[in-house]
Every structure is written in C-alpha cells, then in structure tokens.
Image (cartoon, rainbow, N blue to C red):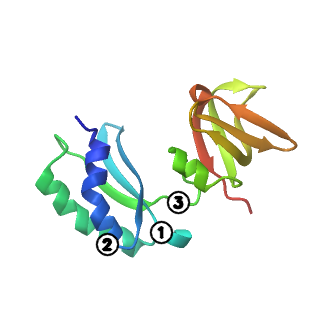
Amino acid sequence: MKKVTEVVAQLAAPAVAAAGCTLWDVEYVREAGTWYLRLYLDKPGGNVDILDCERVSRAVEPLLDEADPIEGGYTFEVSSAGAERPLKRPGDFALFLGSPVTVRLYRAQDGRKEFAGVLKSYDEAAGGVTVTVGDRDLTFEKNDVALVRLRVEF
C-alpha cells in the first residue's frame, strides 16, 4: 500500500504541471493536534508566487475530495518550497552541488549540531553528505543527519 504522500503526489502532479510548476515535496504531518497536508512547489527560476499556490490549491482540492486518500480531517496547504528548502532526495543534492547549505545533526560533533558550508558531494548509495566548511571537508553519515537545508547568504 502506498504512503499518503505518494498517493497525493500522483494526484497533484498533473495540476501542478498545468500551473507551470513542479512538485518539490508533499508533507503529511501532525502539529499541535492537527494533521496538515502540504504541497511544496518549485518553478524554473524559483519564482513561485501566491497566484501559483492558489491555482494549484483550487485544482488539487477537488481531486483530493474525490479520491479521499486520507481518513479523517486535515488542513490542506500549498506553498513555495522556499529559498532555504530542505534537500531530501538524491536528485535534490545533485541539483544543488556547490550551493551553500546548513547541515543539522541529531547529536553534536565537535561540540556542534549545526554546520554551515558548501555542498561538495552526496553519496547516494550510503546517503552520506560532504560539506566544505571553511578550509576542510566534513562528511556526515546519513544516520547522523537530521536535516540538510539550502542556505541563503547575504
């Protein structure tokens, strides 16, 4: 049986494409006692605006009502993936090699849980990520990494 996020991604993909966007991620999470279903959009140039989100929301909501892939109530939201989006899939890492990132760890290493640097490589087989921090390359194993997120530098 497919996960809710996979079913929703399949349902939403044509509507997202028709709006000129791509589906960056689907999230189904419980926060403060309420379930949220979130679609995160991207667009060439990264210029997802409120009208794109509204267009996708209006197109996908009836599809969700018809297919009814989720038991019980939830709040449906559509938004931009954002400039500081998390990187989750191997393709995300490949797309943003050489970009500034922040790596957040589950447990501190060298007295820190967060490292800011430049994404140097991603080992798809092992899931490890290598980041250049200052003048050294640090490799973090998949099981140690809580989150890798793009970082905007000013």
Other residues around mark 3 within 10 Å, as few (<14) / some (14–19) / many (≥20): some
- Residue 83 at what x, y percent from top left? 58, 60
Name the element at disc 1.
loop
| Foreground disc of the pair 3, 1 | 1
Dividing the picture into quarters, in which one does residue 63 lie? bottom left
Please name the residue shown 67% across and 45% down the image. 102
The residue that disc 1 covers is 43
Q: Amino acid at mark 3?
A: Gly
Q: Name which of mark 3 and mark 1 comes first in the sequence.
A: 1
Dividing the picture into quarters, in which one does residue 1 lie? top left
Q: Count all numbered tags in the image, as a single digit.
A: 3
The residue that disc 3 covers is 82
Dividing the picture into quarters, in which one does residue 142 lie? top right
Residue sitting nearer the eye, 127 or 79? 127
Q: Which mark is residue 18?
A: 2
Vertically, is 112 above or below 118?
above
Distance from Cα at disc 3 to Cα at disc 1: 11 Å
Distance from Cα at disc 1 to Cα at disc 2: 12 Å
